[in-house]
Image (cartoon, grey):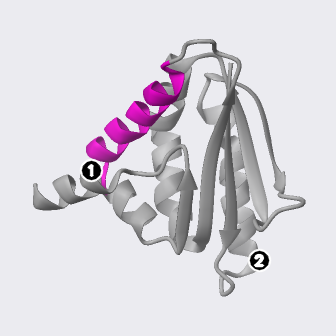
Amino acid sequence: MIYHLTRMTFKPDVPPEEVEAGLERLRRYPREIDVIQDWCVGRDIGGEFEYCAMYALADIRAYETYLSAPWHLQTDAAGLPLVSDFASFDITDDEDAAIADEIADVHRRRFESHPEILGLVEDLDSYAGSGVPDRSTASQLESS
C-alpha cells in the first residue's frame, strides 16, 4: 500500500470560497479516480501548512493511475495557481527496495508528459517531497 499525502498553504489573497472550491476538488478524487482505496482531506494540524490530503493506493500501478488521471491533472491546473507552498510525501509498506525510485520515476514521466503542470509546480513559492521535479528534467523540457 502507498499512502500519498500532499500538504498545502493557499496564497493569502485567495478568497475563502476559492479555497473551499479547491478542497472540494480534492474531496472528489475518490469519485473520479477509482484506484483510491481510502482518503482524507482536511486541516493540517501541527505543521506549517494549512491543509493536507491523503490517498491510499494499492501499489505503484495504482499510484501512476492516480497521478495521471484526467481529474488529477485538471485539479492541478485549477488549484496549483492558488497555492503558495506545497509538499508531497509517501508512506509505504511495500518491501521492494526500489519503490522510492519507482515513485520518483512516475513523477518524472508525469512532468515529461505534462510540461504545463511542471510549469505550475515551478511557479510555487516552495515545493518539496516525493514529487519534486529534478532540475535537469525541467531544463531538458525547456530546451525541447
Question: At 52% from the left edge and 20% from the top edge, which residue is drawn?
Answer: 60
Residue ID at (61%, 22%)? 35
x 35%, y 51%: residue: 134
Magenta span contains residue 34: no
Residue type, label 2: Pro
Residue at disc 1, secondary structure: helix
Q: Is residue 112 magenta?
A: yes
Q: Is residue 74 left or right of residue 16?
A: left
Alpha carbons under labels 2 and 1: distance apart = 35 Å
Q: Do the numbered discs 2 and 1 sit on residues whose CB atoms are within 8 Å?
A: no
Q: The disc labelled 1 sits on which kind of residue?
A: Thr
Taking the image as shown, residue 55 lies to the left or right of residue 115, namely right
**Which quarter of the figure has residue 43?**
bottom right
Relative to 13, 17 lies left or right: right
Residue assigned mark 1: 137
Magenta residues, as a range? 98-115
Give percent across and percent down for residue 25: 66, 52
Question: How far across and down, in percent of the image, does residue 110 sit?
Answer: 36, 40
